Image: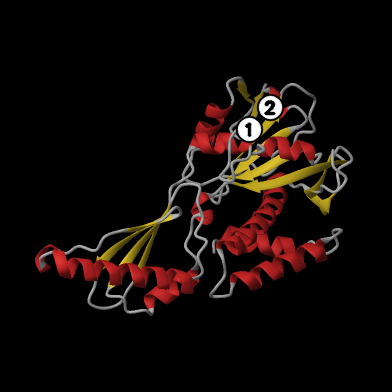
Amino acid sequence: MSKSWDEAFEHFLSLSDVPDHGKKRSEANDKFSAYNRDNRTINEYIALESICTEIKACWLLHEYFSVSITGFDEHSPKATNPNNNCDLRISVQNEPLYIEVKRKCSDESQDVPPGVINIIEKANLGYSLGIETKPKKRFNLNPDEFLGIIEKHLSDCKEWMEKYVPAKHRVMKNYENDEMIVRFFQTDGFSSVVRHFTPSTIPDICSYLLVSGTIGQNGKEMIPMVKLAIEKGADYLMCMIPHWHNLDELIQYCFSSQNHVSKYEITVWDGRLDGLQGLILFDKKNEFRIIYNGKIKVNKIMMINSGR
């Protein structure tokens, strides 16, 4: 874990006087406990990463903007649903602002659970595996289910090849279902697992943030995160994106009308932000950009620590 993550957790632990910190800390502890199990699921991994993103967002606001966190899971007076809370409340120029925190990182949602890796490495299959989770899919099998499927696939393929394929031409056939492709590499010893995933593209991220009408895996229309943040009464949406994308290229793709106030601050004029004061994009490398809604007067989250 990087130094900035260590600092983020230390900062989070120092916020014990902030309302509902104890509840948030308990939630984080529960998710860390689930994460540390060998048979944890991808959904448990994603749940942990989500709360880690909130913790990282707190640290960024403190480290680079000298903003005080004044509440966790706070209800905004602008929320359209009384049961919806925003992840953070902060104070800027003595005014409360509400922050919703999201993440768009396919390297985590498409990962292979460690329990699957462990059981394959111990199974002595005679093959190493390359597991590729398909775009916008998740690995939903538990370790025993996956091992059973792979053992049957290997057995069926070997039986067929022994009947019909000369020994020198035998190559193990890939296994494929709706969620994944598994490739096999013969080995005389230790079986290992190589994980592959399809990175989120800039259009994917733009759609996730801003575009209405996108149909999800369940056949239903997905709600853009900006719209969801507005419904929760947030003033700002903070979103972590994959670190392999350039933030300025993403912003250029998403917004046609923009003005660069500084390296880190951009004002845009876009009706999709109506209801929000702005959008803060950041990544695991602590790069960030603040996008202000130019159509309204905003409480700017000014960058204090500029010596980056």
Does dot 2 land on a helix, a strand or a loop?
helix
Q: Is residue 52 above or below residue 80?
A: below
Residue type at mark 1? Leu
Q: Badge 2 local density, few (<14 within 10 Å), some, or many (20+)? A: some
Q: Badge 1 local density, few (<14 within 10 Å), some, or many (20+)? A: some
Kindly identify the residue that appears in the image at 74 percent across and 40 percent down. 229
Q: Nearer the viewer, residue 259 or 32?
A: 32
Kindly identify the residue that appears in the image at 79 percent across and 41 percent down. 232
Q: Nearer the viewer, residue 37 or 264?
A: 37
Q: Which quarter of the picture shows residue 294?
A: top right
Residue 70 appears in the picture as rendered: no
Q: Is residue 132 left or right of residue 32?
A: left
Which quadrant of the rendered structure holds the N terminus?
bottom right
Q: Nearer the viewer, residue 163 or 49?
A: 163
Q: Which quarter of the picture shows residue 208?
A: top right
- x, y (%) of residue 205? 55, 38
Please give the label number shown on residue 210: 1
- x, y (%) of residue 283? 56, 47
Q: Is residue 283 left or right of residue 186?
A: right
Does dot 1 land on a helix, a strand or a loop?
helix
Task: Tell me the residue that label 2 is attached to.
Answer: 272
Please give the label number shown on residue 42: none
- x, y (%) of residue 117? 43, 70
**Mark earlier in primary sequence (2, 1):** 1
Residue type at mark 2? Arg
Kindly identify the residue that appears in the image at 53 percent across and 54 percent down. 109
